[in-house]
Amino acid sequence: MPGAGHRLYYHATYCWRETFARCKAMAGALERQGIGREDRVAYLGYNTHWGFELFFSVPWLAAIVVPVNFRLSLREMVECIEDSEPKILVVDEHHVEQALAIQRACPGMETLIYAGSGDVPDGMVSYDDLLLQAAVPTATPGGNDDTLILFYTGGTTGRSKGVMLSHINQFANAMGGISLYQLQEGETHLLAGPMFHTAAGSRVYTATLMGIHTVILSRFDVVSVMELVHEYRINTTQIVPTMLQMLLDHPRFPEFDLSSLRLITYGGAPMPVALMERALRVLPGTGFGQSYGMTEASPVVSVLNSDDHSLAPERRARLVSVGRAAPHVNVRVVGPDRRRLGSGEVGEIAVRGANIMKGYWRAPELTRAVLEDGWYYTGDSGFLDDDGYLFLVGRMKDMIVSGGENVYPIEIENILSRHPDVKECAVIGVPHEKWGESVHAVIRVSEDACVSGQDIIDYCRARIAHYKCPTAVTFMEQPLPVSTVNKILKTELKKMIAGEIK
C-alpha cells in the first residue's frame, strides 16, 4: 500500500531470493501470454517493485522491455507505443486512464496488465494473479548482443528515439559503475530517479549484480528522499542538479539525519559550480560523483570522482569538468572531419566501448549518422586537458556564433550561477542583424533580490571576455521550463525570447 500523506513509496519488501522467484514466475506468465523472442513488453507507471521485476522477467524470454515515460503527453506516449509495438502494456494504478486511451489508439497492443493495489480495472489482467498461475518459463533467456531494453530519449529537440541497449551494453555499464563508485555488497541504495530514464534504470542492473539493498521511491519528492535516507540509512543515491537544489533549499533540510550518505552521484545536466560548492560545505561527510553520459552509452561515459570534488585551490578548477573516461570507455574530441584534436582544442566528443548502443530502433539512417567504426558521435562539444579531464562546452547545436566568435553557453552559465541572487539560469543565442547572434541570459533570482539586467551584465564583464557576456537579460518569476528528465528546455526559451523581440 502507498504510504500515508505525501510519502511516495510502497511498503512491500522482498529479499533477492524472493525477487528472483517473482521474476521467474512473471517470465512464465508472460510466456503463456504469447511473449517470445524480440517481442516487446512496455511498462507505464511510477517506480515500483513490479516495474523493477519487468527489467528481468521480460529479458528472461529474450524479449525487450520498454519503460514508458509517464511525464509525456498522451500523444507522445502513443507515439512511443506505435513505434515500439509492444504486445503487452503493464500499467500501475496511477496511469489506468492513459493506458486505456493508448490501447484505443494502438489496437495492436493485445493485453493490459494491472500492477497496483485495489480492484483490477475492467479489461485488464492482474499482475499478481498471473504470478499465482505462472508456469516455469521454457524459453532460452536473452544475452550478449540481444536487445535487452528500449529506452526512449528525452525528445527535447523533436520526436523521441528508441535506443536499443543490449545485455552486454548494460553489463559493461554496471561493472564500470561498481568499480568507479566503489559500490559494496550490503550497502543500501535509494532509487530516486524515474526508471524510464537510463540514469536510474541502469542502476537496477548495477544493484542486482552487487546484491545491494534497493529502496525504490515511486517518484521524486524532497521530503520523501530525506525521510528514506533518515529511516533506512541510505548509503548511495543518484540525482540531477535540480534535485540537489531542491534538497538544499528545503526548509526542513536541517531536520533529517543524512549522515549515512556515503556517495551522491549526479548527472543529466550541467552542475552549477556554486551549487556544488554549497553542497560540499553543507554535506561534508558525503562524497560526490559526477557522471557524464547519455542514453546511447548506457549511460556513463566519464566520471568526476569524489577526490576531485574539492574546494582546495589546486583542485577547484576540476569542478567544472566532467571527469575522466570510465575504464570501459574510450573518449576523444574530433573536428568537423572527425579527426582527433589535440589537448585543449574544442570539438565534438566521440565515445567508444562495450556500453555503446546497438542503434536507434527502426531508424537505420539516424543510426548511421552517429555511429561510425564503433564510435558514437555525441553532438556534445568539449575538450580534453593534458591530464585527460573532459570539459563540456555545450551541445554543438547550442553554440552561439557572435561576430565570428564561438561562445559556449555553459561557460557563462557557470559564471551566472555564482551570483548570490541567481537561483536558475540559462544562456541562449538570439538572432542579431549585425553580429549574427547575440548572447541572451534567462534568469530566475531569489525572491528578495534587487538586481537589474545591467547588474548581471556587469557581473559577467568583470569575469569573462566581453564578447561572451549577455547583451540582454530576461528575468523569470517561475522556474525555467524543463524536460521530462529535468533538463532546461532551451528550445522553449528561444521561442519565448523570439516572441519578446518581435
Image (cartoon, rainbow, N blue to C red):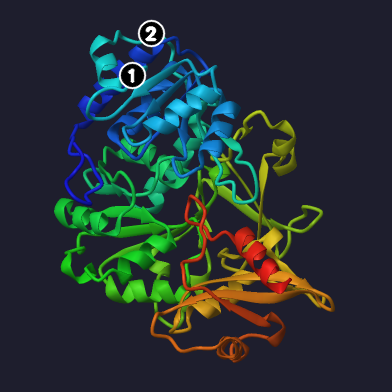
Quadrant into which the C terminus falls = bottom right
Kindly give the residue lying farthest to the right in the view shown: 434
Q: Is residue 291 left or right of residue 232?
A: right
Numbered tag placed on residue 122 in the rendering:
1
Task: Report the Cα–Cα distance between label 1 and label 2.
Answer: 21 Å
CA neighbours of label 2 inside 10 A, class few (<14), some (14 to 19), many (20+): some
Disc 2 residue type? Answer: Arg
Q: Residue at x 31, y 59 (%)?
A: 263
Q: Position of residue 446 (x, y in %)?
A: 41, 79
Viewer-side residue, 77 vs 168? 77
Numbered tag placed on residue 380 in the rendering:
none
Viewer-side residue, 329 vs 106? 106
Up the image or down, 285 lies above or below 116; here it is below
Labels 1 & 2 near each other (Cβ < 8 A): no
Q: Residue at x 71, y 38 (%)?
A: 366
**Quarter of the image holding residue 429?**
bottom right
Q: Kindly state the secondary structure of the residue where label 2 is placed.
A: helix
Q: Position of residue 2 (x, y in %)?
A: 21, 40
Q: Residue at x 39, y 26 (%)?
A: 90
Viewer-side residue, 422 vs 474? 474
Disc 1 residue type? Answer: Asp
Q: Is residue 20 left or right of residue 63?
A: left
In this figure, which residue is indicated by the disc labeled 2? Answer: 32
